[in-house]
Amino acid sequence: MGLLSKIFGKKNVAEREGEPDMVYVPSEDERMNWAIEKANLTLWYFEQSLKNQQPYQNYFSIKVLITDGDEGEHIWLTDPHFDDEGNLFGTVGNEPVNIRSVKFNQKIGIKRDLISDWMIIENGRLIGGYTIRAIRDGVAEKEKAAFDNSIDLYIDEGVDHFKANLETPEGAILAIEKAYKNKDIDAAIACKDFFEEAKSLLSVMKMEIDQNIINETAEVLKLSFINNIEEHGFPDFSTVQNAFPERKKVDETHWVITEVCWYPDGGKSVQLLNTYKSPKGWVVLGPAGPQE
């Protein structure tokens, strides 16, 4: 049985004799919407890996939305590759349920803006596969081990390859950690907004505040940040791998991000980080909850 057959061979699916089953997840499901967004934000890693495959990487597959009139369906493609214009080509990995414009094992080409997921197996571990994770998140906790065993995949939070820039909350976190790795305090400061951090801190303290108090507090926070690094050194993220399994929206400009850090000894930590969409992009304000 192929990997796609194992993935699709679950309950809450449409059964088809002799073919892999198709998993149904409501399109309005927030988990699935985040999964698709996450897949597209990290697609660069899939493309880079496809061009330069490593011995520990195998089973490259990509998921796309195929429409047929008013019907649409997300289909996995095997043997994927991109042309010079970025268009995607691959082989249909399962028999469609709702559409008739493509069939199992057919080679097709499709625009990249229709990509909804990607996956690579690295040392037996699922990387990407965000829609698979969204389905798994909907499974009862006591049934998760059986789910994992049935598709023969090691599924943990994985490793998320957001770009380390200020275009996303997760990218801002990676950008400040990159600055720590490079021991670049100016780059680390550029990933912060001490004024907004001061506003958040003062609001929690329920103090009467004005612009001067915010400015003074922001300056104290900046000096404290610099002094802490000068006294204790940069946090060590040189060998850390990161996953970002969850976002929580506070408002349009404030998001709390769950970050999982994996360490070479097999250990991990989990922390909640406040991020803010400033005029220069997303920045990191500081911890939002207890670390594990």
Image: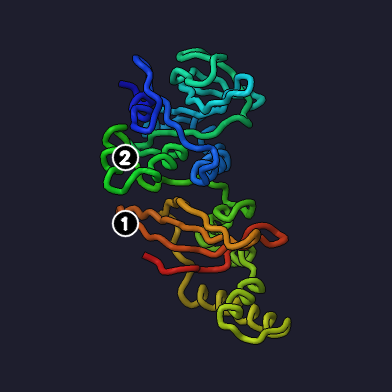
Please determine whether, in this image, residue 114 is positioned above or below residue 137. Answer: above
| Spot occupied by residue 14 in the image (x, y as percentages of width and height) | 40, 25
Q: 36 or 140, which lies in front? A: 140
Q: Amino acid at mark 2?
A: Tyr
* Disc 1 to disc 2, C-alpha distance: 16 Å
Q: 186 or 213, which lies in front? A: 213
Q: Name the residue that disc number 1 marks.
A: 267
Q: Dot 2, how many residues are within 10 Å of its Cα: few (below 14), some (14-19), or many (20+)? A: some
Mark linked to residue 129:
none
Which quarter of the figure is the C terminus placed in?
bottom left
**Is residue 48 visible in the rendered structure shown here?**
no
On screen, residue 133 versus residue 90, left or right, reads left
Question: Which quadrant holds residue 198?
Answer: bottom right
The residue furthest bottom is 208
| Spot occupied by residue 19 in the image (x, y as percentages of width and height) | 37, 17
**Is residue 55 visible in the rendered structure shown here?**
yes
Mark linked to residue 154:
2
Element at badge 1?
loop
Display colour scheme: rainbow
Element at badge 2?
loop
Q: Residue at x 34, y 32 (%)?
A: 11
Mark 1 or 2, closer to the camera = 2
